Amino acid sequence: MTIEDIAALRDSRAWLPPLLLLLALSCLFPAVSYAQTRNTCIECHSLLDPPLRVTQEDFSQDIHSQKGLTCAACHGGDPTSDDPNVAMGRAAGFRGKIEHNRVPEVCAKCHSDVAYMRQFNPSLRTDQLSQYRTSVHGRRLAQGDARVAVCTDCHGLHNIRPASDSRSRVHPLNVAETCARCHADSQYMKSYGIPTDQYAKYKASVHHEALVVRGDLSAPTCTTCHGNHGATPPGVASVEFVCSTCHAFQAQLFDQSPHKDAFTAMSLPGCVTCHENHRIVHPTDALLATNENSLCGRCHSSGDPGFEGAQTMHAGLARLQAAMEKSDEVLGQAERSGMEVSQARLAESQARDALTKARVTIHSFTPARVAADVQEGLKVSHATLEAGMQALAERDYRRKGLGITVFAIIVVLIGLWLWIREIESKKGSA
Amino acid sequence: MGVFRGIHDWLDERFGWAELTAVLKKKTVPVHRFSYWYFLGGMTLFLFVLQVLTGILLLLYYRPTSSGAFESVSYIMTQVKFGWLVRSIHSWGANLMIGMAFAHMFSVLFLKSYRKPRELTWVSGMVLLLLALGFGFSGYLLPWNTLAFFATTVGTDIAGQIPAIGHWLLVFLRGGDQVTGATLTRFFGFHVAVLPGLATLFLLLHLLLVQRFGISVPPRIEAEWEAQPQKRRELHFFPNFLLREMMAWYIALGVLGALAALLPWGLGTKADPFAPAPAGIKPEWYFLFMFQTLKWIPAKIWFFDGELLGVLGFGVAGLLWLLLPFFDKGPSHRISRWVTGIGIFMLFYVLSMTVVGYIAK
Amino acid sequence: MQTEKSDGPAPREAGAGPTRRRLIGFILGGGLIASAASFLYPLLRYLLPPPSADLGSDTVVAGKIGELKPNSGKIFAFGSRPALLVLTAEGEYRALSATCTHLNCTVQYRTDLREVWCACHNGLYDLNGRNISGPPPRPLQQYDVHVRGDEIIVSQSRGA
C-alpha cells in the first residue's frame, strides 16, 4: 500500500456510503426470508408448557406444515404478527382451541373441498366427512357424545403423517394399536356395553401375525373389515361378504353349501360363527371333530346327516394326513441310508397342496367333494410312498450286490494268499 | 499256455521283450520289519488309476455348466444305472487317495528314503502331492452344490491373500472376481486336462526314478545288514511282491465298494450364488489343518496381518519340506535327528488340527 | 512278510503238488472271474444311457400337442417347481411359474375369467404373469415356450 492509498482510505466519503448500503441491505435479508417462514405462533407456543406446547420440531413433521400451511389454516389468527393480541385477535379470525365435537367440520373445510385438495394430491379421497357421519363414531357425535373418536384422535394433532408413512398412527401396521387406545380401555368403554377384548383377540390371530409380524400389508387390520372413516361393525348379513373379499373361494363354496340357508334362517353370520371374528386362529382339523366340545356338535347330534358328514370329512383328512406322514417316514429312512429321493420329496409338496385344498373344500360341507380332493392327495402320497419303498428296495439290492462282490473279493484274496504261499514254499525268494 | 508263448515270442522278435522282462525280473524289494510301508506308494498309484477310470466314466454324463452340473450329477446318482456306484467310488476314492498320498509321504520321511540319490524322487513326489490336492480342490466344485460353492469361495479368497500375485491368482483361479459358472468351467478344465497331463508327466518321472534307484532301505536296517550280511532278505517284485500288492488292491476295491453302497456320497442342494453363506463353511478334510490354523492365528501379529503371515508361513514350510533332501544328507548329520523330530511334530500337528477343524463349529 | 525257507511248510507227497496247484488255480481263477464280473456288470450297464434324457434345469417337456384344449391350462413340473401351461382361446401357448408370489400357493387357470387365479386369497394374474388384483405383490415369472414336433418345450427365459 502506498501513502496515497492510506490517505484515500482515511477519506470516509469513499467507503462509508457503500458500507451503510450493505448494512441496510443485510438487515432486509433476514426480514425477507423470515417473512416467508415466520410462524410467530410456534415461536411463542414452543416455549410454553403442555398442553399449549407445540414445537417447531413437532410441527415440521406434520404433512400440513410440509405443504406450506401454518397454524392459521385450522386455528385462524395471524402467524406473522409478534403481538399476541393481533396474532390471536378476533380480527384475524382466531378460533383458539377447536372444540372436540367441531373437529370433523374444521378438517372437512379443506379435506371435503375437491377443488382445494386437487392442488395438493388429486388422488386423495374427499368423502371422509360424509363417511364419518355414517359411522358409529359419527352418529354418536351427532347425538352429542363427546367421548367418541374424531379426526385428531386417530390421525394425531400437530404431527399428522400421511397414512403411507410407517410412523403414522393410521399406517396399516399401527391401526389396531390406535383403535385399541379406546377400544381396549375397559374403564373408558364402560358405558357403551361392548367388549374391550378385540385387540387382545386380534393379536392372537393369523391376520395380526401376517400383518405386524411378517409385514404382509395385504393382511387385514381393524379398518379393513370395519371401514376406517365409516367405521361400523359389519352386520350379520354382510360378514361373509367382508371375508370373501380375500377368501373368495371359501365363500363361494359356503354359498353352495347347505349351511348358507340354514345360517340365514337362524340369523347366524357366515364365517365367524365357526372362525370367530377377532381371534381368528389357524384352523385345525379338530374343528371338524364331533365330540361334545366341538363346533359341529353345537348344532348337530349323533345320527343326523350333518354329524355323519362331519365325521366322514374328518376321517378323510385324517387318512390323508396319515398317508403323508407314512410317506415322509419312509422317505426319511431312505434318505438316512444315503439314497437319493429329492424328486419324491418335491412331489410331497403336491400332497400338501391337496390337503390344503381339501381343507378349503370343507366349506362346501359336502363330503363327496372333500373326498374327491382327499383322493387326489392320497394318489400323490401313495406315489411318494412307493418311491420311498423303491429307494429302500434299491438300497437292499445294492447291499446284496456288495455282499456278492465282497464274497468274490475274499475268494480272490484267499486264492492269492494260497498262491503266494505255494510259489514261495517251492521257489523261495532271492 | 501255448498262446502266451506264441505272443511272447512274437513280441520278443520285434521289441526284445525277453530283454525287458529280464530287467524287470531282477527287480527286488527289501524285506524287513518296516517293509509293509512299501505298499503305500503302489496303493496311491492304484487309487489314482481308479480315479482316472471312474472319472472318465463320469465324463460320459457330466455337464460342466452352472445350469447343468448339479442336474447332471443328480442324474448320474438317480437315473444312470450304477451311476451312484461310479460317483461314490470317485468321491470316496479321491479322499482315500489323498490320505494314502500323505501316509506315503510321511512313511518315506520317517524311513529316510528321500536321501541321496533319491532327492528328485522326493521332489517329484511332493509335486504329485500338490497336484493331488489340486485335483481334490478342483473336483470338489464340480457338483456345483452349496457346500462346494462356498468352500471354493473361501479357498480362493485365501489364495488371494498371497502378497504381490494374490489378486492375479484369485482372478485366474475364479475366471473372474467372483465364483461363477466361469469358475466351474475353468476348474473342470484343470481337473480333466491340465492336472491329469501334469500328473502323468510327474508320475512317469517318479516311477522311472523309483525303478532306476530301486527301493531304498532305512539307514538303521542298512547298518544291521552291513554288520550281518546273512540277515539281508529280498523279495522278487515279479511275481511275489506284486501278488501281495494285488491283495492290497483288492482289499481297497472292497473297501471302496462298501463305502459306496453303505455310505453313498451326498449331493446336497444346488449352489445359489445370491444366497448368504451357510454357517460353518469348511473345506475338505485334507485342507482342514491349514484352514484351522488360519482361524486360530490372531488377526494381527505385531503390525502384520495374521492371515497373510499364516499363508506365507505355510508357503515357507512347504518350500522347506520340498527341499528336505538337500538339507538332510546322511545319518550322522545332526539335521537328520531334527528332521525326524519335525516330521513327528508335523504329523501330530496335521492330525490334531484336522480333528479340531472337523469338530469345531 | 513271507521269506524264503529252504524247507517247505511240511513234507508233501509227490502228486499232491499239482493237485494243490490246480485247486489254488481254481479258487484264484474263479474268484478273479467272479470279481471281474461284479466289476464289469455295473460298468456295462452304466455305459448304456437311461431312457429319460437329462435336459438340465432350465428346459422341460411340458406336454404334447393335443393334450390341452383351447382356453385351458395344466400344471407341470419345471425342475423342482410347479409351473402352469396355458393354451389360450386364440391358440397361443403360455407358460408361467405357478407359485403365487403372495404365500406360495399353487395358482390355476380360470377358464371363465381367462386369467390366472390363486384360490388361497383371491389373487389374480393376467396371462403375462402380471399381478392385477388381490394380495400378490409381484408378477409370476414367465417362461419361453417352443413347439418341437409334437412336444411342447418350456425353458427359462433368456435375457429376461
Image (tube, rainbow, N blue to C red):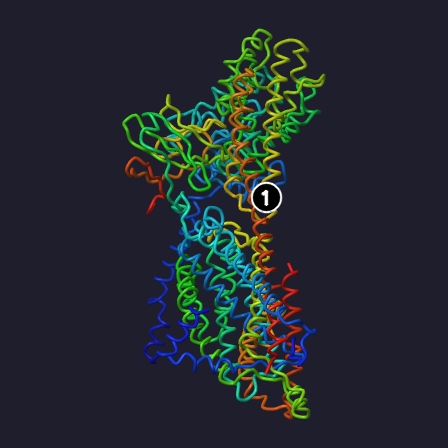
- The residue lying at 43 percent from left, 34 percent from top is C98
Q: For residue C99, which quarter of the picture?
A: top left
Residue that sits furthest to the front in the current view: C14
Which element type, helix, strand or loop, lies under badge 1? helix
* Image coords of residue A373 (percent x, y): 52, 23
Q: Residues within 10 Å of mark 1 (few under 14, many from 20)?
A: many
Q: Position of residue B115 (x, y in %)?
A: 57, 87
Q: Where in the figure is residue B18, as x and y percent of width and height? A: 43, 80
* A152 on left or right of C60: right
> Residue under mark 1: which chain is it in?
A
> What amino acid is found at the position of numbered circle 1 in the picture?
Ala
The residue sitting at 67% across, 69% down in the picture is B352
Q: Is residue A14 left or right of residue B210?
A: left
Q: Is residue A177 visible?
A: yes
The location of residue C25, given as percent across then percent down, is 56, 64
Rendered-image quadrant of the C terminus of chain B: bottom right
Q: Residue A112 occupies which quadrant of the picture?
A: top left
* Residue B337 visible to the viewer: no
Residue beneath disc 1: A334
> Could you tell me which residue is drawn at 53 percent across and 51 percent down?
B268
Along the line of sight, the residue nearer the viewer: A167 or B302: B302
The correct choice, above or below, for A418 with respect to B12 in the image is above
Which residue occupies the foreground of this view, A369 or B9? B9
Residue nearer the viewer, B153 or B260: B260
- From the viewer's side, name the closer residue of B15 and A164: B15
Above-or-below relation of A211 to C28: above
